[in-house]
Image (cartoon, rainbow, N blue to C red):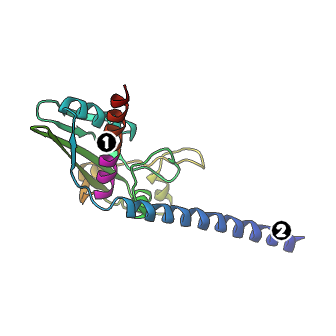
Amino acid sequence: MQKDIITLIARKSIRSLSAYALITCALILAGCVEQQQYQAAEPLLMRNINKIQAMEIGEDILAKMHFTIDKANNETGYIRTRPLSGAKLFEFWRSDNVGSNNQLLSNLHSIRRIAELKIDEQNDDLFIDCNVKIYRLSLPERNIRSSAHAYDLFSTSSSGLQNIQITPEQKADMTWIDLGKDQQLAAKILKQIEKRIVSEQTVSKKI
């Protein structure tokens, strides 16, 4: 009887590991496809559209990617978002992790991104550029004086959900490390903006 139980547990463990392996492979393959599709963020050159229209489209695209607009200036053609926390594995409806490396980074660390759009109008030409900065949270470790003290790292909650408690000392030393630019996400944002502009121009021509 005991052997049967052990065998059943082993089979379930193997099935679970296989499922996780398949999911991981799917994410890596999807990330590779996206990584090939969005190599670098090259500024867009668009025509037959004014700065105000481009600003509205840019804000809408960023909003649909769950960014919140922090600053928008129609005169200078500048848009900046508030920091957006990186999407986790279970947040399948989000699309801010472009490529397997960014997907892995977002699930292993606490990261956030800030997107900027710069729209410059020159004669009949409109140049749209995107810059996305990525940051990783650096949190000082909390010293554990005993095995019993280890439980104080988390709040009293359910066995399935624990909330971390940050001491005032940790909060004072908490910093966001600049990891540079997320070229892949910037390229994706520009591609979405270009697609929207072309689509609206096609519809207006038909009308």
Q: Amino acid at mark 1?
A: Ile
Image x and y of residue 38, in percent: 35, 58
| Residue depth check, mark 2 versus mark 1: number of the one nearer the observer | 1
> Could you say whether the residue bearing mark 1 is in a helix, strand or loop?
helix
Residue 12, disc: none
For the residue pair 7 and 46, the one nearer the viewer reads as 46
Q: Based on the displayed image, in which of its 4 quarters is residue 60 positioned?
A: top left
Measuring 41% from the left and 47% from the top, which residue is drawn there?
A: 165
For the residue pair 16 and 25, the one nearer the viewer reads as 25
Q: Is residue 144 visible?
A: no
Q: Is residue 171 visible?
A: yes
Image x and y of residue 14, in percent: 70, 70
The local crowd at label 2, few if under 14, some if 14 to 19, many if 20 or more residues have their Cα within 10 Å, is few
The local crowd at label 1, few if under 14, some if 14 to 19, many if 20 or more residues have their Cα within 10 Å, is many
Residue furthest to the bottom in view is 3
Q: Based on the displayed image, in which of its 4 quarters is residue 134 positioned?
A: bottom left
Q: Amino acid at mark 2?
A: Ile
Check if residue 36 falls in the magenta segment.
no
Q: Earlier in the sequence, mark 2 or mark 1?
A: 2
Check if residue 187 falls in the magenta segment.
yes
> Could you say whether the residue bearing mark 2 is in a helix, strand or loop?
helix
Measuring 46% from the left and 51% from the top, which residue is drawn there?
A: 88
Magenta stretch: helix, strand or loop mostly: helix
Residue furthest to the top in view is 207
Q: Based on the displayed image, in which of its 4 quarters is residue 199 positioned?
A: top left
Report the residue marked by disc 1.
193
Report the residue marked by disc 2.
5
Residue furthest to the front in view is 206
